[in-house]
Amino acid sequence: MLFSATDNYGLKVALVIPNLDAPATVDYYLTRWGSRLSYIQVMNEPELSSTWSVGSIFTDDEIITNFDNMYQIIESHHLSAQLYTNFGVGYVLRSNVPIEASKKLDFVGLDIFQASFLVLSPHFIQNMQQITGKPVVITEFGMSTADGQAQSDYIIKGLNLFKNMGLPGCWLVYWNSALDNYEIRSRPAEQAVGEWIAQNVAKNAV
């Protein structure tokens, strides 16, 4: 049903793989639906990855090992989907992680939340482009707030910024979400984003 809907609306689908997912689980989804995917997220903000031990984090070597293990599973399916890993702004403290991971990716993602990070985002984007040599897509962008107009203004400001920087894409978080105030459904941002898209159709969007 999902793919029937996305096909009907011409939408592309990405598979998001949580950092601690079991290889068998990933293999299961790729075996059944891998051919329908346009993008596969190899890891999610790996610079923040933690082990099961409370308060501990993976070493850089462990992160790259986990990345390589997941990459091998994905590659074994010989899919046409583009591969990416998204990073938060904390990547600057562990910049070797995106440098190493990007060698096996089609593009790298950057997640931008909070007004302060939006203001600083051009520096993060340019740095990410320089250290990886790969296109940068804003893979998570949004604002969790009950103030619908503030959310709308923030999102439109970001879309204009990223378009002017020539980025190939920006993915919003979220259209629909019952757990937080990130959703834009039936809020001012939904109409504003629709109008923005109508006026700024990106022919080369990722």
Image (cartoon, rainbow, N blue to C red):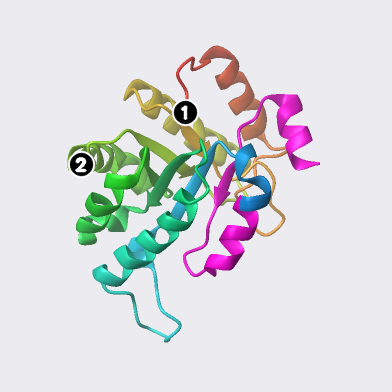
- Tell me which residue sits at (61%, 26%) in the image: 192
Residue 128 vertical position relative to residue 202 in the rendered view, above or below:
below
| Structural crowding at the residue carrying mark 2, measured as other residues with C-alpha within 10 Å and reported as few (<14), some (14–19) or many (≥20) | some
Q: Is residue 44 visible?
A: no
Mark nearest the camera among 1 and 2 is 1
Relative to 13, 129 lies left or right: left
- Tell me which residue sits at (32%, 46%) in the image: 104
Which amino acid lies under the numbered mark 1 shown in the image of this protein?
Val
Instruction: Report x, y in % for residue 179.
Output: 68, 59
Which amino acid lies under the numbered mark 2 shown in the image of this protein?
Asn
Quarter of the image holding residue 96?
bottom left
Residue position for label 1:
206
Q: Quick one: SS at disc 1? A: loop
Q: Farthest residue in the bottom direction?
A: 53
- Tell me which residue sits at (60%, 49%) in the image: 182
Relative to 199, 94 lies left or right: left
Residue 32 vertical position relative to residue 169 in the rendered view, above or below:
below
Instruction: Read off the magenta span.
Output: 1-30
Near-viewer residue (3 or 31): 31
Q: Earlier in the sequence, mark 1 or mark 2?
A: 2
Residue position for label 2:
127
Instruction: Report x, y in % for residue 185.
Output: 71, 39
Instruction: Report x, y in % for residue 5.
Output: 77, 34
- Tell me which residue sits at (49%, 29%) in the image: 156
Near-viewer residue (138 or 155): 138
| Structural crowding at the residue carrying mark 1, measured as other residues with C-alpha within 10 Å and reported as few (<14), some (14–19) or many (≥20) | some
